[in-house]
Image (cartoon, grey):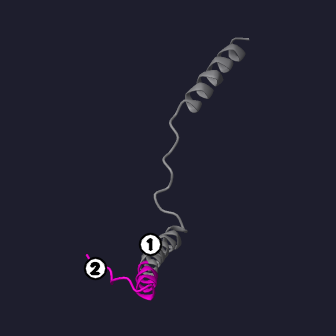
Amino acid sequence: MRYVKYSTMALSVLFIASCSSPEPPPPAKTVFDPLTQQVERAREVQKTVDENAEKTRKELESQERGENRPKEP
């Protein structure tokens, strides 16, 4: 009967100790990291292209209306 009592206590202590350990940090690098970096770079480039296209469109519209050409910074 002692063995059952001690084994139950030992198992409960081990269970509590194993559950209270901190979670391991997420992996620093995954297989998809190069792909996600390329996607982020492509989004940044597209944003730059869109901004320049919008600026050019506004300049063309102002010239079509006969307004003075906007000064560049």
Tell me the quarter of the picture where residue 6 sits: top right
Q: Position of residue 13 (x, y in %)?
A: 59, 22
| Residue drawn at x 42%, y 83% as measured from the top left | 56
The relative height of residue 73 versus residue 64 in the rendered view (above or below) is: above
Residue 44's label in the rendered image is 1
Q: Position of residue 70 (x, y in %)?
A: 32, 80
The boundaries of the magenta stretch are 55-73
Residue type beneath disc 1: Glu
- Reading the image, the residue beneath label 2 is 71
Camera-side residue of 18 and 58: 58
Q: Secondary structure at mark 1?
A: helix
Q: Quadrant of the C terminus?
A: bottom left
Residues at marks 2 and 1, CA–CA distance in whole angstroms: 26 Å
Image vertical order of residue 19 relative to residue 29, above or below: above
Horizontal relation, residue 22 to residue 5: left or right: left
| Residue 64 falls inside the magenta stretch | yes
Q: Is residue 62 magenta?
A: yes
Q: Give residue 29's mark.
A: none
